[in-house]
Image (cartoon, grey):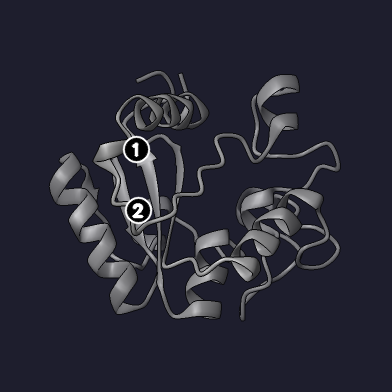
Amino acid sequence: MGSHDLLERLVIEIKQHPEEVSKDLKLIIIPIINPDGLYERKDKLNANGVNLDLNFGTKVWRNYGPEGTYAGPEPFSEPESKIIKDIVEKNNIIQMISFHSMGALSVPEDNKPSIDLAEWYAQKSGYTYTGPDTVEYFGYEYFGTPTMWFAEKTGNAGSSVELSSHSS
């Protein structure tokens, strides 16, 4: 079970118990943003060899990321990242959480709404709150992520959650 399984289970849970979600909120849940990496391989890359977690147009975007992963020829060069961009631009999104595995971490972007969200998630989940400096935990800096782009673009909360493992 990976992040896609968790999110698919969340959709089922919400369908079974819609009263758990405020009627004033709209949830947009995308269980799989990289079907190429899920079904054909077990890596972070899409069919074009692009790490989608690095393909978003942030202030510090560049072509290559940690461990030499390719971020694409330009920001939003990939259909998957364009879909996320479109969803954000067409909706009044106030929070974005990106789920990954593994590490049991709650990782905010570098603004107060993001930090507040990540601290709340860490408290509720028991995961470790990392703070916005990911170098300390991962050994390298991520740039061009969906949550970083979202927080920069909107000023709202963007946070990543590293699930406890790839299978639970």
Residue 136 placement (x, y as % from top left): 34, 60
33 over 4 or under it: above or below: below
Answer with mark 1 or mark 2, whichever residue precedes in sequence: 1
The numbered disc on residue 137 is: 2
- Assign the N terminus to one quadrant of the image: top left
Give the spatial CA distance, label 1 vs label 2: 10 Å
Task: Using the rendered view, name the quadrant where residue 112 is placed.
Answer: bottom left
Q: Give the left or right position of residue 57, taking residue 108 as reference.
A: right
> Which amino acid, mark 2?
Tyr
The residue positioned 74% from the left and 49% from the top of the image is 80
According to the image, label 1 marks what residue?
103
The residue positioned 68% from the left and 37% from the top of the image is 34
Task: Using the rendered view, name the quadrant where residue 164 is placed.
Answer: top left
Residue 115 placement (x, y as % from top left): 28, 68
Circles 1 and 2: CB atoms closer than 8 Å: yes
Of circles 1 and 2, the one toward us is 1
Mark count: 2
> Which amino acid, mark 1?
Gly
- Assign the C terminus to one quadrant of the image: top left
Q: Give the left or right position of residue 77, taking residue 66 as reference.
A: right
Along the line of sight, the residue nearer the viewer: 146 or 72: 146
Residue 97 placement (x, y as % from top left): 42, 53
The residue positioned 42% from the left and 28% from the top of the image is 6
Please, what secondary structure does the residue beneath circle 1 have?
loop
Few, some or many residues within 10 Å of mark 2 (<14, 14–19, 20+): few
Q: Give the left or right position of residue 142, taking residue 112 as reference.
A: right
Please, what secondary structure does the residue beneath circle 2 have?
helix
